[in-house]
Amino acid sequence: MKRVLLIASLLFVFSCKGDNLEIDGRDQIVFNQTVDDIAKDLPLLQQTKFKEALDIVYHYRTNATNNDEQRWSAVRNLLDGKNSDEVFELAEKIASENGFTWNRNQVPLANGIPLPGSIISEEEVPQEEVEINKISRFDFRVSNETEGIRLDPFFFDKDGKELQLDKVSNATVEVFSGGQVIYTQRATIDPNSMDALYRNNGILVKYVNLDPSKIQANHVDVLVRIPHPERYLTQRKSVQLPDNLVAGKVENKVDSISKVINKDISMITTLSNRFMQNIAKKNYSAAFALTRNNDWATFQKFSSDHSIALLENSKIKDTKVLDGDEKVTVVETNVSLEDNTTKRYILTLENLNNKWFIVNLK
C-alpha cells in the first residue's frame, strides 16, 4: 500500500511540471523531488541561491535543539505549496530580520550563509568589505589589439566618482554572436593605477579563442559580469572584428539586438514605459516595484532621488531598444519634461530570476 501511495505521489509530482512549480511537503521524498524540479527550472546562479534560501529557512526557522529529521519536517511544513519566488521572498525576509544581507540576486556566498550567532554588527565589518560596497557601477573601454579584444574597466560610486580598487576583482567575460554565447572567459582585474599614464588592469580576449565557425557577423557583443555583495554588476558592448578574422565568411554587421530577446522586445518597452509613466504620475510605489538597484535599496531612497523627481508630469515621446541579450537590455526613451524641454534617458533592464527589472536610469 505504501508503495502504491509513493508511486501515486511521484506521478502527481511529475504531472505538476510547469512554469510555476510548487513545493510539495507531504513527505521527504516528494519534498526532495519537487525541490529538485524547481531548482532545475531556475538559471544556474539562481539554483545556488535557491539552496541557500532553503538553508536559511532550516537554520533560522526551525528549533536547533531538535534532530535533523524533525527540523526538515518543520521546513517541509513551512514551504509546502510555495513556489521559488515565495521561497526567495521568505529567505530575504528572514535575513533582514536577523541582521544580515541576502537576496536572490546576490553573488552566491563562498562560505555559505551566516549561521545564527555568527553575525557581526555593522561597526565590526572589515574596512575592505565596506570599500567593495561603495562600487555602484562600472564601465569598460573596448579596443582591438594585435592579439585580441582589450577591455579596460572603470569603477564608479553612486555619485559617478571613479573609484580605485584596492585589491584584485574577479570577472566573467561572455562573447556573443547572433545571440549565442560563443566563448566564456574567467579573468581577474588588477587594482587601478590612478596616477599611471597606462592602466594595467585590462582583460584580453584573444582572437585565437574565438571559433570562426560560430561567428555570424563582422562584430561580436561582449558582456562583462563582476561579483558584488548585493548582485552582479554587468556591462555589455559591441565590438567590430578585424576583416582577417571574419574573412568574408559572414554577412555584414547586423542589428546587435540579440535574437534571443526579440520575443521580449514588446514586453521590455512596455515595462520601461510603465516605469516612466508611474513616475510621471507620482505613483512612486508602483515604479519602485519594477526596480532592482543598489542606489534605490529602499523606497525612501528611490522617492527622494532628485533625478526621479525631474520626471514628474513628463510625457513619453518614443521608446526603443538599443541593444540587448537574454540577460541585459538597454532602452532609450525620449520624454518631454514639465518645462517642455525634451530629454533622452537610457534605461538598463536585467533579467533576474526570469523577470525583467529596471536596474539603472541615466
Image (cartoon, grey):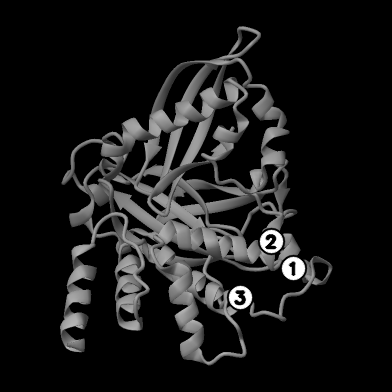
Residue 302 lies left or right of residue 280; in this view the side is right
Question: In the figure, 47 relative to 272: above or below?
Answer: below
Disc assigned to residue 132: 2
Q: Secondary structure at mark 2?
A: helix
User: In 3D space, how far apart are the residues under numbered discs 2 and 1 (Cα atoms)?
Assistant: 7 Å
From this viewpoint, is residue 248 visible? yes
Q: Secondary structure at mark 1?
A: helix
Mark 2 is on which residue type? Ile
The quarter in which the C terminus is drawn is top right
User: In 3D space, how far apart are the residues under numbered discs 2 and 3 (Cα atoms)?
Assistant: 27 Å
Residue 22 lies left or right of residue 55; in this view the side is left
Mark 1 is on which residue type? Glu
Disc assigned to residue 33: none
Q: Residue at x 17, y 80 (%)?
A: 7
Query: Which one is in front, 237 or 91?
Result: 91
Neighbor class of circle 3 (other Cα within 10 Å; few <14, some 14-19, many 20+) is: some
**Residue at the far top in the pictured view:** 340
